[in-house]
Image: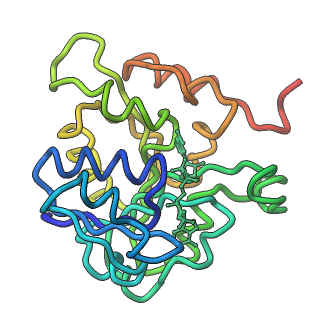
Amino acid sequence: MATIGFIGAGNIGSQLARLAVAHGYEVVISNSRGPETLTALLAELGPKARAATTTGAAKAGDIVVVTIPLKNYPTVPVEPLAGKIVIDTNNYYPQRDGHIAALDNESTTTSELLQAHLPASKVVKAFNHIYAAQLTTDGRPAGTKNRRALVIAGDDAAAKATVTRLLDEFGFDAVDAGPLKEGWRIQRDTPGYGPQRTAEDLRKDLAAAKRYADRE
Ligand SMILES: NC(=O)c1ccc[n+]([C@@H]2O[C@H](COP(=O)([O-])OP(=O)(O)OC[C@H]3O[C@@H](n4cnc5c(N)ncnc54)[C@H](OP(=O)(O)O)[C@@H]3O)[C@@H](O)[C@H]2O)c1
């Protein structure tokens, strides 16, 4: 797993690209406006990074991170991501994304939407509940007391194992919430969304999460 592709190079995409380069990965980054708009980030990331179109980043990545405003997920290239692990950081904010009925009525979850768009890919939800800046400050070596943990969810066990190893390399424990349909347990406004948590605390947060419909 030498190359990580990025669809989205904003707060989260750029931070994950920094982490990836720092841990020896090649990165191929993309955004909506085109590779020529990414020169400043490329200069910072150095020789292990290059920019491409979204299709180019999708083709180049052994693992590909989708980290864009959720409403734009239908534009993510499908065919070049077939068979690949796709890490989904996206969250639903109606004020930004507009209303998506299936999310408002909780008949699906954000990562299930991306998985339905990418039926031949292995979508793993990850990095959705940590502030971008903390990605490069909160990581600690494995075994550190009170190491921060992050939630993953996904329908493919091998893909989740790969993402768990990536999280560990980047300095975080992983807590498996189960299949993608359980990803709502770490959506916005749930107890685990945002605060720094150990694996033990995060498991409690996941168990305590309530559906929007079940809240006061
Ligand atoms: N910010 C956080 O701390 C945080 C934490 C966890 C999760 N998240 C979630 O992660 C996602 C990304 O958040 P962010 O804060 O990084 O967003 P952001 O700073 O607004 O960056 C979004 C990136 O996505 C690109 N983009 C937009 N539409 C695209 C498309 N159709 N195809 C390819 N690239 C596209 C943008 O490129 P252009 O600039 O060229 O349009 C930009 O590089 C969101 O769903 C967010 O809710 C954010």
Q: Nearer the viewer, residue 188 or 154?
A: 188
Above/below status of 187 relative to 104: above
The answer to whether 70 is drawn above or below residue 12 in the figure is below
The answer to whether 150 is drawn above or below residue 45 in the figure is above
Q: Position of residue 20 (x, y in %)?
A: 22, 50
Residue 216: where, in percent of width, then height? 89, 24
Quarter holding the N terminus is bottom left
- Residue furthest to the top: 145
> In terms of image quarters, where does ligand 1 lie?
bottom right
Viewer-nearest residue: 106 or 41: 41
Rendered image quadrant of residue 58: bottom left
Front-lying residue, 20 or 161: 20
How far across and down, in percent of the image, does residue 41 sit?
33, 56
Furthest-right residue in view?
216
Taking the spot 58% from the left edge, 79% from the top edge, the residue there is 75
- Tell me which residue sits at (37%, 85%) in the image: 80
The residue at 23%/32% (across/down) is: 171
Of 124 and 23, the residue lying toward us: 23
- Residue at (16%, 19%) from the top-left corner? 143
